[in-house]
Image: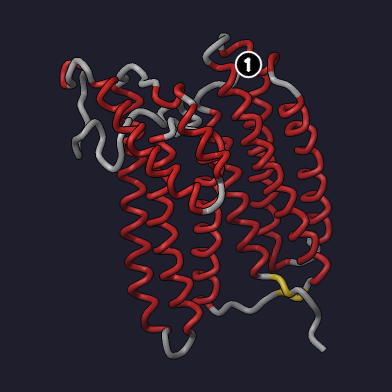
Amino acid sequence: MRSTGSGMGCPDWPKCFGAWVPPTSVSDLPENYKEQYSAYREKKNVKFAKYLNAFGFTETASAILNDKSILQEADFNVTKTWVEYVNRIVGVIIGMLIFAVALSSIQFWKSERRLTVLAFLSLFLVGFQGWIGSFVVSTNLTPWTITVHMALALLIVALLIYLIHRTKNESKVESPVAFWLLVACITALLIQVVLGTQVREAVDVIASKIERESWIANLGSEFILHRSFSWLVLALHVILIVKLAKTDSLKSFSLILILLILGTILAGVGMAYFSVPPFLQPLHLLLATLTFGWQFLFLLKLKRQRSI
């Protein structure tokens, strides 16, 4: 939602403008809606700051409480409101499905308790993700909160993929060198995702000051590092694919992985050369997430060491 600019389409959480079905026109809102929801966020942030102080993040808590720009309410935009609302509905559906997975996992409590524990951990993290999401909204998309939100999403993806893999009881392919190459690929991708969040934060700083066509030209070292690091990500994956070229059982995995990497990089190139088109931003993030999920599933299919 951050990439589409719709993250603050609903200024409150879990409802949207105080209703379960959001408005379709600004005339449906009270005249003082900006002041009303600004006060709501301020109250929420005071609570959030207490949690941060309790865990020792006093400087972060102070920064949130003293940053008045967080409380600035945007003009109502029906498109952004409904994009954010649909995003929340999808989140609820995912939560319900993971709840069903957790209930289903109870059958493994005696035979393989780890599956039940991880399934309920996934359910807990989905709830925690929603709770964090409420503060993402209340802090007006403060960059680090969105990064945490993204990291939690990737962790949930990894847990669910692991559950799927374990319940299938598939045999692993013996390729220890490929295993460690893939670990290097995953590490590089995660670093690249973090670098990407830094670029996005830099974009957030300049987006309100200059036109979209000038965003890339006014980015600093964050963008150069993110762009340059993509070559390392690509090179590691090419080495991995070459290593697995003669492993028939993994050819389809290898092909899909390299296509996902190329798609992610091409989406990034498109943003750089075509003034960051709005549709490419979520596509770039989606492809990166799919790549991580596929990498992790791939990793589970490989043996780390040879059998003795």
Viewer-nearest residue: 295 or 229:
229
Judging depth in this view, the residue of 72 and 74 nearest the camera is 72
Quadrant occupied by the N terminus = top left
Element on which disc 1 rests: loop
Observer-nearest of 116 and 43: 43
In the displayed structure image, the side of residue 200 where residue 21 appears, left or right: left
Query: Callout 1, which amino acid?
Result: Trp
Tell me what residue is drawn at x 64 percent, y 52 percent.
Answer: 256
Q: Is 97 situated left or right of 208 in this image?
A: left
Question: Which quarter of the figure is the C terminus placed in?
Answer: bottom right
Residue indicated by mark 1: 215
Q: Residue at x 73, y 75 (%)?
A: 303
Relative to 258, is 148 on the left or the right? left
**58 above or below 123?**
above
- Marker count (numbered): 1
Q: Is residue 57 above or below residue 103?
A: above
Question: What residue is drawn where x is 43% and y is 34%?
Answer: 139
- Asked where in the image residue 234 lies, by quadrant, the reply is top right
